[in-house]
Amino acid sequence: SEQEQTFVMVKPDGVQRGLIGEIISRFEERGLKLVGAKFMQIDRELAEEHYGEHEDKPFFDDLVDFITAGPVMAMVWEGQDAVRQVRSMMGETDPAESAPGTIRGDLGLDLGRNVIHGSDHEDPGANEREIDLFFDDDELTEWERVDETWLYE
Ligand code: DAT
Ligand code: MG
């Protein structure tokens, strides 16, 4: 199956709670490859564009407040079926509904503090749209992991 890239972000709650390393480790150990990373604070304009699909929802203003409230760790991860695999490792949108073993199921309790963002696998093109929104082309680095011949058949 196909190599693809997905946009992932440790949200301000995850950064403040010291979970960046834990979350990066999970993707590294799974075999995904980091090709871009940026520690940054999101301004309201970027937040409103990133979450544009939710602009009519009642929780939109709180969501924008939250995602701009502190620094985030924005990343691009690459691998086989990466968009879907990252979503499956994240768990459900609500940590309370997320299975233990998933990132939200292990590290969160509350819907509005769910630790991580990952591009939606049910929205084709969301990954490329989000990567373009957060990263310039020259901020992504193509490389080969030494274990790739053992990760993939
Ligand atoms: P996901 O982050 O799993 O892709 P989403 O795109 O539906 O979920 O929503 C984006 C974020 O908005 C989500 O991570 C948390 C917040 N959110 C979603 N539904 C909500 C709700 N009903 N009440 C409050 N916040 C919500
Ligand atoms: Mg989403």
Image: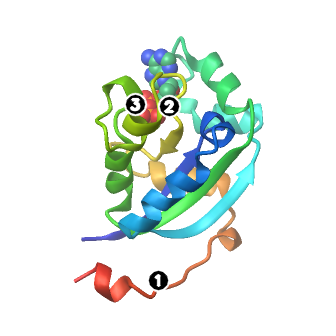
Q: Earlier in the sequence, mark 3 or mark 1?
A: 3
At a point 63% along the width and 52% down the height, the residue shown is 74
Residue labelled with disc 1: 145
Q: Position of residue 113 (x, y in %)?
A: 54, 27
Residue labelled with disc 2: 114
Q: Amino acid at mark 3?
A: Thr
Element under disc 2: loop
Crowding at mark 2 (Cα within 10 Å: few <14, some 14-19, many 20+): many
Q: Earlier in the sequence, mark 2 or mark 1?
A: 2
Given residues 91 and 77, the one toward you in this image is: 91
At a point 27% along the width and 80% down the height, the residue shown is 152
Label 2, label 1: how many angstroms apart (C-alpha)?
Answer: 30 Å
Label 2, label 3: how many angstroms apart (C-alpha)?
Answer: 7 Å
At a point 42% along the width and 43% down the height, the residue shown is 103
Q: Position of residue 134 (x, y in %)?
A: 66, 53
Disc 2 under 8 Å from ligand 1? The reply is yes
Q: Position of residue 142 (x, y in %)?
A: 56, 80
Q: Are marks 2 and 3 in contact (CB under 8 Å)?
A: yes
Q: How is the image coloured?
A: rainbow
Residue labelled with disc 3: 93
Disc 3 under 8 Å from ligand 1? The reply is yes
Disc number at residue 95? none
Label 3, label 1: how many angstroms apart (C-alpha)?
Answer: 31 Å
